[in-house]
Image: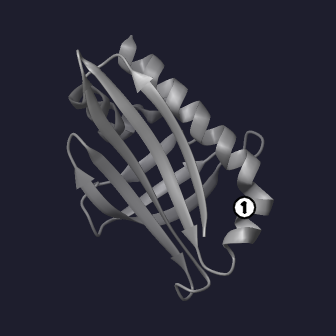
Amino acid sequence: MWRLRAEVEIAAPAERIFAILGDLAAYPEWNPFTPRVESTLRPGDPIHLHVRLRGPRLSHRVEVVSANEPPRRLCWRMQLGASWLLAAERCQELTPLGGGRTHYRNEEVFRGCLAPLVSWLFGSTLRRGFEEVALALRKRAEA
């Protein structure tokens, strides 16, 4: 198992932040790591992620929405072959802190025998991307 996480405190209510996360058409305006996303965001439906892993070219991934619980949690998952080979779930969670502030956590858990390979090949790039998203989300929500 390999876990990747980025967290930040945002001076905005969870409802406002969740609305930003759910406005997929606006991702190109603020999200440097995943500037294009298409989905209904209904659990069980596909989510098309266009991710900037290296350079200007986007990598296209199709995953499945696993949770959409406004204004607290939005998740999607993927599986490559059998679950013992590679499976991952990414969850973005919002925890109200009071006073109009919210804790944002973006976490992905990778499982399976290929998880160490994903960490080795993409770990630093994914970590940077998650951190960039957290900071960009904070900037957008606080504007």
Of helix, strand and loop, which one carries label 1?
helix
The three-letter amino acid code for the residue at tag 1 is: Ser
- Total numbered labels placed on residues in the image: 1
| Residue 136 in view in this figure | yes
- Residue 1, above or below 55: below
- Residue at left offset 41%, top offset 53%: 91
- Along the line of sight, which residue is nearer the eye, 39 or 11? 11
- Residue at left offset 57%, top offset 67%: 110
Q: Which residue is mark 1?
A: 119
Residue 115 position within the rendered picture, expressed as x and y whole percent measured from the top left: 66, 71
- Look at the image and tell me in which quarter the C terminus lies: top left
Answer few, some or many: residues within 10 Å of disc 1's Cα (few below 14, many 20 plus, some between 14 and 19): some
Judged left or right of residue 2, residue 90 is left
- Residue at left offset 49%, top offset 50%: 107
- Residue 28, above or below 105: above
Judged left or right of residue 43, residue 137 is right
- Along the line of sight, which residue is nearer the eye, 53 or 50? 53
